[in-house]
Amino acid sequence: MKKIKNILILFLLFTGLMRINAQTSTEIEKANKSCKPVFLVAYNANGADADKALSIANSAKKTLKASSLVIKLKTSDAINSDLVTKYRLAGAPLPMILVLDKNGTATGSLTLKDATAEKLVDMIPTPKSSELIKALTEGKSVYIVVYKESMTSKKNIAENCAVACSKMDNKTVTLMVAMDDKNETKLLQTLKCDMNAKEPVTYVINKAGQVIGQYNGLTDVNTLMSAAKKVPASGCCPGGAKTGGCK
């Protein structure tokens, strides 16, 4: 009877641990559904360093004006192996704090020695940048149309981009970004957008994340399609990430 009781206790402890660990992926999924960015603290063992990383992540959460979450990920727990693989944490110097955007895509990471609340907050992409990163992770090219409401040609430009997307079997997406959108200041600065432009400017970013075309005013569909397929030898995507996508 005593042996059965001990086995039952072990079973309850094990299943309880499983539920706790399972919460990591569940919490990330919930954050994605509510479009909240996440500061993901990855660590392999409890201790002072893990506590410091968690403290920095919580400071970043307080610093960020928008709603966000801090989630812990213990990499040594077998149930988290899929997350370890997904975020490429095997062999990484831990603890590490990853920034996940509203779509759950990792947009940056910092080890404990380099991490500060300010640096982590700066890694949160703008809303349109988040859409851009999502498209790139799906292997798509992107048309970014930067415009002012007063520019009458923006409608025709958007329509041409839509036609180009359709002809490319929706392997491209179009993002419309207003020049006066304060939420997109960082993206506009990265694109080196001419704020005095008289017509909308279309930036073409290939699926490798490289800005490989910039067109002022109305651009024909064939030109847009051709540009989106180009893969130059070197380049950089908005945000300064290396060729291969924004990370």
Image (cartoon, helix red, strand yellow):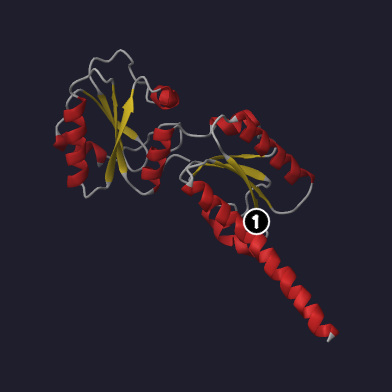
Residue that appears at 55% across and 36% down: 67
Drawn side of residue 142 relative to residue 41, left or right: left
How far across and down, in percent of the image, does residue 58 sit?
67, 37
Say above or below: 232 vs 31.
Answer: above
How far across and down, in percent of the image, does residue 171 sit?
27, 47
User: Image quarter for residue 240?
Assistant: top left
Q: Can residue 243 be spotted in the picture?
A: no
Say above or below: 1 vs 160.
Answer: below
- Disc 1: which residue: 75
Say above or below: 198 vs 234.
Answer: above
User: Image quarter for residue 152?
Assistant: top left
User: Image quarter for residue 21?
Assistant: bottom right
* Quarter occupied by the N terminus: bottom right
View extreme (right): residue:
2
Q: Can residue 68 be spotted in the picture?
A: yes
Drawn side of residue 77 relative to residue 222, left or right: right
Residue that appears at 33% across and 43% down: 207
View extreme (top): residue:
196
Drawn side of residue 95 relative to residue 129, left or right: right
Nearer to us in this view, 43 or 181: 181
How far across and down, in percent of the image, does residue 4 sit?
79, 84
The number of discs equals: 1
How far across and down, in percent of the image, does residue 168 sit?
21, 47
Amino acid at pointer 1: Thr
Q: Neighbour class for label 1 at 10 Å: few (<14), some, many (≥20)?
A: many
Residue that appears at 40% across and 44% down: 134
